[in-house]
Amino acid sequence: MANKKNVDENLTKNVNISSNKPAKKPFPGKNPSKNKDQTTNSGNKKAKIEEIESIYKALYEKSSNAEFIIKNGVYIDCNQTALDILGYKKKSELLNWPLTHFSPTFQEDDCKSSEKFQKMLDVSLKSGSNRFEWTYTYKNGINFASEIVLTTIKNEPDNKIIVCVWSDISDRKKNKIDLLKKERQLRETHEMTQLGSFEIDLLTKKVETSPVFDKVIGKIPENINAIFLWWNRLTHPEDREQNKKLIKNSFKFIAKKLNLLNSIKKLRYHLSTDCIKLEEKSESLCTILTKR
């Protein structure tokens, strides 16, 4: 019995010692709470990146501009707008072709398309981006004018990736050509009929006058800011109020008639004024002078 009692006491003693043993410390440098925060932050960053990627993907796919992705000199992807403009239905019809497959052999400047596009790519790879005009070909074989912006994404020896964004500018080019044609016809008509005229480009501040206008009215001031004061002084007093309104609304499409006084002969002339807008980059104030 004595032995059993001693054994029980020893067991109890051992249990008490074990229960009072200090808790095991965590491994130095490991903080469960901190690790949890880091995991949460990492998850938030990943979600943010995925959100940004989805936004850019939607922008690429839904853009009103046509877009190609070029890798090592070959089209590897395009958006729906590129298919629509060129007249194709499936991406497989556009991809994995050489870059000038949808272009005529020669561009408008008589440069070979394959050589010129390579030069444009080289500029983009060197400077990061490049903007230029280019002639593409619809599926039906008709050529059309476009404006291209190349942006380099990666420039590694075996991994050159460039985004090619372009738009059809056929209408804009046609309007420009038509306007230049009309301007030429107008000059020829003035020369034949001895009409006086002057034109002011309100953006470039360039002024052009016909010989008849110079002869009748005199030389226009070179400073564009002084032209409107000069113009007002030439205007007949009865029409000066209308002249002020005309100048105020000079950037709108207008057609007005004014009377000008020749400062020497005091003869009255009719002045028809039109404001012409070209490609949203140029505003011209064109006038035609006829003797009253």
Image: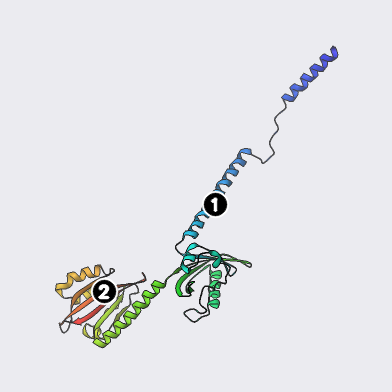
The tally of labels here is: 2
Q: In which quarter of the image is residue 280?
A: bottom left
Q: Is mark 2 on a helix, strand or loop?
A: strand
Residue 57 image offset from top left, x and y in percent: 51, 57
Identify the residue position indicated by label 1 in the image: 50
Residue 46 image offset from top left, x and y in percent: 57, 49
| Colour theme | rainbow
Residue 236 image offset from top left, x and y in percent: 16, 76
Residue at 52%, 54% in the rendered image: 54
Q: Does residue 232 appear anywhere in the picture?
A: no
- The answer to whether 282 is drawn above or below residue 110 in the figure is above
- The answer to whether 162 is drawn above or below residue 38 in the figure is below
Q: Is mark 1 on a helix, strand or loop?
A: helix
- Give the amino acid type for the residue marked by disc 2 in the picture: Asp
Residue at 60%, 44% in the rendered image: 39
How many C-alpha atoms fall within 10 Å of the one at disc 1: few (<14), some, or many (≥20)? Answer: few
Residue 94 located left or right of residue 225: right
Residue 135 image offset from top left, x and y in percent: 47, 75
Q: In which quarter of the image is the C terminus?
A: bottom left
Between the residue at mark 2 and the residue at mark 1, the CA separation in whole angstroms equals 54 Å
Q: Which of the two discs, 2 and 1, labels the residue nearer the N terminus?
A: 1
Residue 38's tag is none
Q: Quadrant of the N terminus?
A: top right
Identify the residue position indicated by label 2 in the image: 274
- The answer to whether 59 is drawn above or below residue 209 in the figure is above
Do the numbered discs 2 and 1 sit on residues whose CB atoms are within 8 Å? no
Which residue in the rendered view is the most extreme toward the top?
Answer: 1
Residue 283 located left or right of residue 239: right
- Give the amino acid type for the residue marked by disc 1 in the picture: Glu
